[in-house]
Amino acid sequence: DPARRTLEHDALQRTRRRITTVRGVPAARAAAPSEKPRRTIYDAQHRTSLPGRKVRGEGDQAGGDDSVNRAYDGLGATFELFFKAYGRRSIDDSGLPLNASVHYSEGYNNAFWDGEQMVFGDGDGEVFLDFTLPVDVMAHELTHGVTQYTANLEYFGQSGALNESMSDVFGSLVKQHVLGHGAEEADWLIGAGLLTDRVTGVALRSMKAPGTAYDDDVLGKDPQPGTMDDYVHTARDNGGVHINSGIPNHAFYLAATALGGNAWERAGQIWYDVLTGGDLASDAEFADFAQLTVAAAHARYGEGEEQAAVREAWAGVGITD
Ligand code: ASN
Ligand code: ZN
């Protein structure tokens, strides 16, 4: 009987809390606060069963596999941005362990979050290199976990493109934080260094200039729009989630560069407030998100340049709040 089990569980929790707070020792201290990541990296050994063989746990020394070491460091860099900039304790804000598998399948040309962990392919070496090379790609996948635990944006149409954009925004911010780049110095590319030199292109996506990341015989031309005028109506890619994400991506770029300084500070804080604040519906559209960012800018910074920059950024991509 699940109801009964819940009652028993609650009673047990109450007892535990009473026990752990005797002599004023707070329960939170006993429960080990998660101000550090708890990472585990697995080697899928070119197979598709997950997670594969454990090859590096938290605190273990680096071994000889560069993919493993990059994944370990990338998870650490992502944890660090979310914790240092926004006080978030891991994906669920409660210290969720971070698991990632590398060497997924053979020559696999993608990386993904499967609802529980991150998964990285090696790339085929023809078009794509190893997906652990760009730190923003690793952070992108992890941010899908953050979104899952917060706004849980439905992965279709505009809400899906917002989901994708959250991953690109915080993916880029993790890279900027690692490099110590302010908004002006940042390249605003997602996945720079992932394409082989046989491909005519620089990255998977550009937040600064959506639609210009690549133009190649095999990959075709980067299909991303940067404004609502060029919004792509399509059934493929879950209604264009990786395509129309160019629009909110560019709005973030416009807001962050108008404000200047470190993009993770004010622009990033406003976007984070909306993603995690509880008012963003899982089926939100771009205009809903825009409205909430203007409100969040006002709530945190008042009637100042932040609110104006955010409002103008959305206007710049054809969305009025
Ligand atoms: N790398 C892609 C993403 O994170 C994988 C996918 O299409 N689901 O969105
Ligand atoms: Zn994604």
Image (cartoon, grey):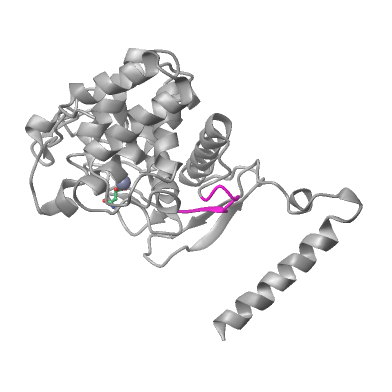
**Residue 59 seen in render:** yes
Residue at 61% x, 49% y is 38
**In the displayed structure image, the side of residue 4 where residue 17 appears, left or right:** right
Quadrant housing residue 135: top left
Q: Quadrant of the C terminus?
A: top left
Asked whether 100 falls inside the magenta stretch, the response is yes
**In the displayed structure image, the side of residue 215 where residue 290 appears, left or right:** right
Looking at the image, the residue that sits furthest to the right is: 23
Q: Is residue 199 above or below residue 285?
A: above
**Residue 268 seen in render:** no
Q: Where does the image place residue 138, in percent across and percent down from the top left?
A: 41, 42
Q: Nearer the viewer, residue 63 or 303?
A: 303
Residue at 33% x, 27% y is 294
Asked whether 312 falls inside the magenta stretch, the response is no
**In the displayed structure image, the side of residue 238 where residue 37 appears, left or right:** right
- Count of labels in the image: 0
Q: Quadrant of the N terminus?
A: bottom right
Q: Is residue 14 above or below residue 145?
A: below
Q: Is residue 220 above or below residue 109?
A: above
Q: Where does the image place residue 35, in percent across and percent down from the top left?
A: 65, 41
Residue at 52% x, 33% y is 81
Tell me which segment is drawn in magenta: 92-101
Q: Where does the image place residue 158, in percent across and percent down from the top left?
A: 21, 45
Q: Nearer the viewer, residue 238 or 59?
A: 238
Q: Nearer the viewer, residue 165 or 132?
A: 165
Majority secondary structure in the magenta region: loop
Q: Where does the image place residue 288, in percent across and percent down from the top left?
A: 26, 39
